[in-house]
Each structure stands twice: as structure tokens, then as C-alpha cells.
Image: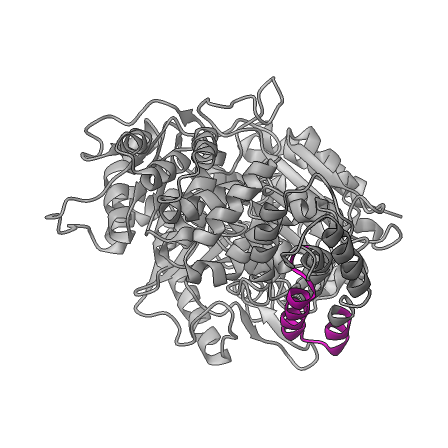
Amino acid sequence: MNKSPAIAAVWACVAAAAWAGAEPEKAPELHPAVRLGIRSIEASPRVHAGSVVIVPDGTALLGAMRALWTLEARAGRGLPPILIDDGSDGAFESIARFVRAFRPGTVLRWTPPADDDGGQPEWAGLVELLAGPAKERPGPGLVVVARGDPASAAGLVLAVARRQHLLILDAPPATRGVDGVMPAEELAALDRAIRGALSGTGQKWDGLGDDLDAITIAMNVPGRIPAPAWAGGELALTDTLGRDATGARYAYAGLLFGDEAAAVGRAMAAVFLTPPTRPTEAGDADEAAGSIGAARPGALLFDGYRPEFGAPFNLGPAAEALRKAGYRVTQHTRQPPTASAEMWLRRGRGGFDHSLVIVNTSGEPWWFDLNPGRCVSSDVPPNRVPSVVLFTHSFSAQRPGDVSTIAGRFLDPLAGGSFAYVGAVHEPYLSAFLPGPAAVGRLLAPMPLGAAVRHDPLGPQDRVPDEARRFFGPWKVQVLGDPLLTLPAAGPARPRRAAELPDNALPGLVNVADDARAALRASDLGAGLRGLVLAGRDGEALRLLRAIGRDNRKADDAAIAPCAVALLARTRDLTRDDADLFVRLFAALGTGRREHPVWRSMLWQTLGPTVGAMPGAAPDPGENPEADRRMVSLLMNHPRLDAPLADATLLAPRVARLLGPGALSAFLDRAAGLAGDDGIRAAIRALGGGLGLINMWRCRRSLRAGCTCGRRCGG
């Protein structure tokens, strides 16, 4: 029997009870994780929806927080999001993505005065100044940071925003990088430090449902630890911390990593984009276009399992629960071909526009099977808004800092831009995952993310299959992101204040949109275009870009190319003129960008459908051969490293027709050289068979038509 609908229904009832304003004496009847979710929301600040503030680095972030995130502002006008633009492509795209989702009235930039010596209190002092004395903080968790670790700025954000306790390590663990494996002795030292800090708070912490139930690790530390021999592989750090000597859980953990800008962006999204604003009466994703306040949240459910496989994981009940909670739901059921690889690529053109993405699939860290077909990590689209991702799939979170893997591609700020990801670090077995309908019901209850995705024997509401009980101990499912972020189904959204910040709140604030228009008046198209995108004026930026394309001036291409290429890659329904402009601007990117796997993915995701619509070997009198040649040549010279066969299959007949057999042979040799398997190499080289006769026919036809250049048909 499929229990998923019943589980979802039970948790919907829990959600209603939780938000109905239960009497204090009845509060203990709630599931401890539901109480934790409610406490997380209550500890979070009022949201100042009128503005987003951009600063250049972590030092400026602390200065802006000190001025704008005071206790008085928390109780009054609310706190504005503060994001870091360090000049990198990832930081720029992360801010643009956040602004699309948050929809502020204004986007402001602040740069500290040159003679500003900082004058910031020490980290612990800053948290006490902005979150109140430790003994008065209602926040339900502990945040762990380390001096010298760039992700620690995000930890300070979460400690202040949710008024949590802060543990500051003098130095991060010696083994660095989220993709590594933490030695047992370093894990033991970290665990001792956490227990000591929890004990030092004077609050209860050693069981679920007490004062402190969450641990956030905001450091670039390994996400995997050695597993016992019987388990094989590695275990997830976040499913190991927060447990006592018997393995019983006393807190839910999450891991926040990345450079300073990326980690702070994820933390700000967790605080300010969740819980989502309740939907308006209009019920349309675009009903608030141009207005202040986040749009109705969207959810993408993509079920790549076969119809007969894993009935409890069928995402139908999850889709229904999300619709009732007010989400825009895009559902791809497990009936072919609705959840095929082709549908994934089609849905992803222009980027996903969903704040919650749930996928059922299988595969390895670099690829995932759908029904039917296979996608690779570079098929993860350049998302338009920040998202929470639940990916039921073995190994997907093994190396989340590596953009060649699935989690790495979703979390990379230039690519997917997700701010939280739940996936496996090794082979966990299907029963280790909480089925999507149960996870959704728990998230809407509202359980925070760190608890909602865990098998835990807590309360009568849980219906845990016997085969899942062995996963109550430390296992292999990782929570990457703030463990206290919530997605409640009912109850009021946190208050949002839309008024602009007062002029004296932080002297020196500059309106980004005003700056952009001033740059355009001065003919600085690069600064103008970037400013429009940062200010959330995508439509205005796209109109400007198309005008630049019609003007055909190429002197500014290098200045506008990074912003313009990313904007076009995130634009749906591209025209052929847009595609030709994309070709021109991608060619103007520097070599470093063109060689980067994320930029190459944008190239193929954006132009692939246009090339696919071109005729193959047969001639087409209506074609634009010069533009087609430029497009095919660009793709041919920038192959994706993880999809040589798919790309060669798409491109080979167009290369043969437009550039000739010599170019085809060179292209296939290059593509075969990228393949890591003899069978794939043979399949790629076999694509050259049969195309020679087509080219001979094409050549004779062209010569009869008076063509003697040899380029059109190969001579």
C-alpha cells in the first residue's frame, strides 16, 4: 500500500494545528521538529522589503549589519538583506537571482569611506550587539565559525538573524575543502568543541525538543567522514554531528560552505526568501511584477522513476500538498515521456523559475537517469531564482564544491544558484531517503529543512517503514545549507516593511538603478547593463541588449559580454536574432570564461535548441548559411567535457553540411578524445559514417547551382 497520501495528509493536519495558535500548555503535543520550525520563524527578523543593500566585501558587510541590523530596526522597520559583490561572475549572478525572487523597491550599493578603519566589534561582540545577550537569545541553535574561513561571514549572518549562539574556533580544522573526507581525529575535536559550547550556554541541549536543537557549520570543511567497514564509502558530516555516544540525535545539523560572497548569499536567501510570502488573490507568478514583495513561490517536481518503481516516492501527493499550500507547481510525472531527459532540457531552457526543486532519479555524481534518457551535470540549467533542492539520487552530493557534479552544479552561484541542497554523499540505498511526499508534508508543517528530511522515530505522526529504521543512526544523506530554513504551509508570513531606508540609516547609499541610467547616458553600456540587471530590471536590460544587437556595434562587446551572455541564457523564448547575438557575445568573452565549464554549459543550453531546429544533411533554401556556420563553429570549438556523445550527435550532421568532411573529421576526433569510455569513443567516430555520401550529393547540387567555394559542401 502506498502510504504517501496518508503521510502528506497527516502532516497537513499538523501544520494546521501548529499555526492555529495552540495554547502554551498544549505545545508539547506538537512534534519536536515542528516546534523547532516555529521557533526558527519566531526568532527570525522582520523583513524590510523595500531595499536590498550590496557591499564589496565581508568587512563592509559587518559595517552595514552594524548600522542596519540593530535591535531597534529588528523590532521596527525590519532588516534588509545585505549581499556581497566581490566583482566575480558568481557574485553578480547570485545577487541578480536573489533580487528576482525578493523584488525589493530599490537596490542600493554601499562602499565604506576610504578613511573608515572599520571600528567593528569583535565577532562575538557584534552578535551580542545585534542579537542581544546570549542568555536572552530565543534562537534555537548554535552556529560554528572559524577565524580565517571565508564561509564564517555567513555564520555571523545566521547567528544574528536567528539570534543564535556562536562558537568561534581559533582556526578551522586542518583538512580543508568541502569535497574531502574529514579524518576521525578532526571530527572528534569538532564534536568536543560543539558539545562544550552547548554546555556553556546554560540551556538544555542534549535531547530533541529542548532549548537548542540545531547546529550550523559555516566553514569550508570536508562534508564526508569515514564510514564503518560494514557501511562502505563515507558518511555525511551533517548526519553524524548532533548525536550522543549512543548515536541518538540531539540536534539537526547543516553545512554552509563557499567563498565569502557565495556563502553569505546562501545565508541571506535562507533568512529572507523563506518563509515565502503568502500568495495573492491573483494567483499568478507574475501578478506582482513591478511591485514590492516576493512573488508566489514555485515548485518543480520531476519524477524520473519508472511507473512501477518505489511507489512511496511517487511525487503526486507532494504536488497536491504544495498546490494547497499556495505554490505554483510544475509537475513531471513518472509516465514517459513527461519526465524524460528531453523534457528536462526543454523545461530548463531559460532556467528553472522555482524556489523548490524535487527530483527522483538515479546515477552517479556526474549524471542522472530519467524516464527515458540520461542527463549530465552540465544539463542543470542556469536557474533564475534561488532554490532549495531535494535530490533523491546516490552520490549526487559527494563533491558539492565541484561543478562537474550534480550538487556542485546546482549550488554553484554562476550556474544553478541553489542555497540549500539535500543529497547523498555515497550509495545510501533508496530507503535512506525520506520519500518526497513525506518530506514536503514535514516542510509544510513547518519542520525546518534539517529535520524535515531525516528519518527520526519522533512522535505518533511518523510512519517509518521497517526497512528505514536502520537509517536512524548516522548515514549518508547530507544537508547543505541552513538547517533552520522553513517553508510553512499556513499562517502569516513574517511582516514585510516596504518603505525605503531612511537617509541617515547608512550614509553613502547609492541607488543602483539610478547609477545604471547615468552610466547609459555616459555611453558606458557595460556598467549600465550590469546595473539594470542588479536592480532587477531584466526586461529593461533585455530591450537594451536587443537594441545593441540591431545597432551591430561591436566595440562594446567585451564590456557587456559576461552580463549579456548570462542574461540571454536565462531568457525564455529566444528569437533567432537573440541566438545570433548570443553567438557574437560569447565569442567576445575572454578565453578563461570560454574555457570554464559553466559558461560552456550556458552555450550549449542556449544554442542547442536553435541548432537542433536547423536542417541536418538535407539542404534548406530558407537557411542563413553564414549565421549557421558561425553558430556551429562556435559550438564545435567549445565542446562540453561531460557530454561528448550527445553534443557530437546533435552537431555532426550540421558540421558536415555547413563546414565539410574535413571539419567533421576534426570535430569527431576532438569529441572522441573527451570520452572516457571506448564504447562512447566508437559511437562518436561512427557518426562520421554515412555523412560522406550526403556531402557528395550536397557538393554536386551546389556545383550545379554555381557554388565553387568548397566551404558550403566540403568541395
* Quadrant of the snapshot with the C terminus: bottom right
Q: Picture coordinates of residue 193 (x, y %)?
A: 40, 68
Considering only vertical position in the picture, is 381 above or below 494? below
The residue under the point 46% across, 80% down is: 185
Q: Which span of residues is magenta-colored?
A: 658-683
Inspect this view and state whether residue 447 appears.
yes
Q: Residue furthest bottom?
A: 229
Which is nearer the eye, 419 or 693?
693
Q: In terms of secondary structure, what is the magenta stretch mainly?
A: helix
Q: What is the basis of the colouring in this image? A: one colour
Reply above or below: 46 against 560: above
Q: Judge left or right: residue 684 versus residue 388.
A: right
Residue 672 on the magenta span:
yes
Residue 510: which quarter of the image? top left
- Is residue 113 toward the left or the right of residue 131 in the image? left
Residue shown at 35% from the left, 64% from the top? 149
For residue 350, which quarter of the picture?
Answer: top right
- On the image, the x and y values in percent for residue 119 come to 15, 50
Looking at the picture, does residue 82 appear above or below residue 378? above
Q: Residue 454: percent from the left, percent from the top?
A: 64, 55
**In the orientation shown, which residue stands out farthest toward the left?**
115
The foreground one among 578 and 470 is 578
Choose top left, top right, bottom left or bottom right for residue 530.
Answer: top left
Residue under the point 75% across and 48% down? 619
Q: Residue at x 84, y 50 (%)?
A: 311
How many discs appear? 0
